Amino acid sequence: MQLRHRLIMASAALATVFLSSSANAVNTFNNRAEWQSAAGTPQTITFVTDDAGNLLSTPPAEFPFGSLTLKGVTFMNGISAYNDYIYVRQGEVLRVKLPPNTTAFGLDWAFHAEAPGSTTFRLSSGEVFHPPPESIPYSLGHTFFGVTSDTPIEWVEFSLNSTALVIDNFSFVVPPMRVGIDIKPGSATNTVDSHYDGLIPIALLAAPRILHLLG
């Protein structure tokens, strides 16, 4: 039983080692289902409640925030609107700090009013995107924009030069972390006696950066 428990604990610490590359592959999507198929299972922030399940504002109202953290994602310099969505004023920049090792994000976005302009979505890895300006006003719906990346995305910035930019249903994906496990390091057989009730040494095989994250 102790062996099984320790193996489960080791499995829970699985981590993906990301190798640096000079050519980072970043893909964009305008369909949420296609993005999710490529990105994996996401977590989604709807801007209705906080992590404890409480409404962001009671009664529902607009309130500006310097920093708003939901599900480990920090939104900076925006406005929460009636427990429904957030937005950033014309010409200002909303920065979103993502959890470590995030490799994909997606969101529904729209113009606050019928004033199409130039949108700028900037990634920490240097890529800049200007989604088409034909997005409809938020009262009539949203447009989806999603990204997948071969390497982690630390943050993303959003801005619009003609009117406020509305953001809703912000989704992100952090892949499971993986490491190799060597049972009985130094032994060629790696045998395990299921009836043994003592401790069995194991070694975690990963880059130093991953081992540092595991503590």
Image (cartoon, helix red, strand yellow):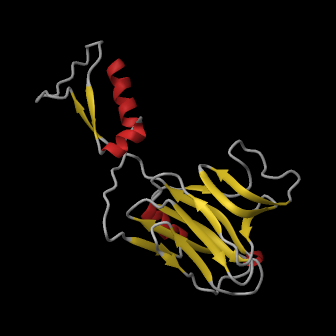
Task: Name the quadrant containing residue 159.
Answer: bottom right
Q: Position of residue 153 (x, y in %)?
A: 47, 61
> Residue at coordinates 51% horizontally, 77% vertically from top-left?
128
Left or right of 44, for residue 41: left
Left or right of 123, for residue 215: left
Camera-side residue of 78 and 29: 78
For the N terminus, the quadrant is top left
Up-down relation of residue 58 to residue 32 (above or below): above
> Residue at coordinates 36% horizontally, 36% vertically from top-left?
11
Left or right of 76, for residue 199: left
Furthest residue toward left:
188
Up-down relation of residue 23 to residue 191 (above or below): below
Camera-side residue of 98 and 104: 98
Q: Position of residue 176 (x, y in %)?
A: 41, 48
Up-down relation of residue 169 to residue 55 (above or below): below
Q: Position of residue 150 (x, y in %)?
A: 37, 64
Left or right of 189, for residue 52: right
Camera-side residue of 192 and 203: 203
For the C terminus, the quadrant is top left
Q: Position of residue 171 (x, y in %)?
A: 57, 60
Whether residue 50 can be seen here: yes
Task: Name the quadrant containing residue 87.
Answer: bottom right
Up-down relation of residue 71 to residue 91 (above or below): above
Whether residue 142 can be seen here: no
